[in-house]
Image (cartoon, rainbow, N blue to C red):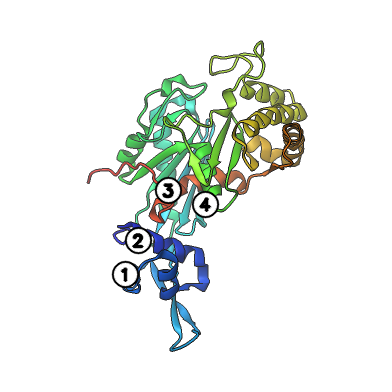
Amino acid sequence: MPALRGHNAALVLDLLRSAGEAGISRLELAERTGLTPQAVSKITARLRAEGLAAEAGRRASTGGKPRTVLRLVPEAGHAVGLHLDRDALTAVLVDLTGAVVAERRAPLAFAEGADAVVDAAAEAVRGLLGAGPRGMAPPGVGVALPGPLDHARGVLRRVTGFPGWDGFPLRDALAAKLGLPVAVDKDTNAAALGMALAGAADSFAYLHLGTGLGAGLVLGGSLHRGARTGAGEFGHQVLRLDGPPCACGDRGCVEALCLAAVAAGDLAEAARVLGTAAGNLVGLLDIDRVLLGGRTVLAAGDLFVRGVGAVVAERVRRGGGGAEVSVARAPGGERAVAEGAAQLILAPLFGRAATPFTVPHS
């Protein structure tokens, strides 16, 4: 999108998006961005010429003629979000507001290897683009999948249980296959990014329990990936030194304990284990909120919220200070990771996050 060239344009676009259908005037844009009215007029003229902004009517002013208000045009651009789980694929096409306009789901098998997974991902993206609005702007593709991985280079490391993926350049491979910009991040990071942009809390942990267990961390309003994208490997903290072996090579990891309890049908025990690990995280990072997601949690949400909440509340009580840490189901349901993956593409366009892209050569 040629109009999305600078920081100032991103600020204006973000305010247009936040204003919704009601719109916002140029004077308000100048006041809230700190830009001059002339600079705002120049930016909004360019956004209108590109089809990204449009008039939303007029608003009475305190003096002089009524002000023209502008709004974002949601359908002026789109992005694809892909959630590649170990056994399933979820893909969404979203507009500039993040609203889902098309969706696809399909089985997936990480064990079949990188080439098969890339082919399946590319097929899903092409299907979405074919089902999307006619004449839409070419999107980018955000991909979220289990870690660990190198977010900056889009290269996978030893995905737990699938060591054959170690070193695979997923971002470059998918960009070459599709001819589109691609960004890659961990599933938990993508989901947490989407929730942070929606205003979930200033500091929170998103805990995802599905085929594996991980965390996305938002600290002080910013997604925390760590220097090597290693933050949030929550599932591999050891809770029991003589516990069952984990696919990561250690023993007694919270992931192994949780999944064993789930397999045995003892969801209350799974919630207790998850709550113990969540309590450790709360004690370490002093976060405000814990959000629970992933297919296992979604299948028994109330049980997990109660079970994890009780353990976390007791941990916080023992710590003193009178603070409360809420535990709740994460918003977004089964699409939370895929929608967050789309924000890997959209958020930078609105000046909200920096995401490394691969842009294929033409």
- Residue at the left extreme, as displayed: 362
Q: Amino acid at mark 4?
A: Leu
- Cα separation, mark 4 vs mark 1, equals 26 Å
Q: Secondary structure at mark 2?
A: helix
Residue designated by label 2: 8
- Cα separation, mark 2 vs mark 1, equals 9 Å
> Where the N terminus falls, by quadrant?
bottom left
**Depth check: 320 or 182 in front?**
320
Q: Amino acid at mark 2?
A: Asn
Residue designated by label 3: 353
Residue designated by label 4: 197
Q: Amino acid at mark 3?
A: Ala
- The answer to whether 66 is drawn above or below residue 206 in the figure is below
Residue drawn at x 44%, y 49% as measured from the top left: 80
Mark 4 touching mark 3, by CB under 8 A? yes
- Cα separation, mark 4 vs mark 3, equals 10 Å
Residue designated by label 1: 39
- Residue at the front extreme, as displayed: 321
Residue 121, x across and y down, in percent:
43, 39
Image quarter of residue 39: bottom left
Residue 12, x across and y down, in percent:
40, 64
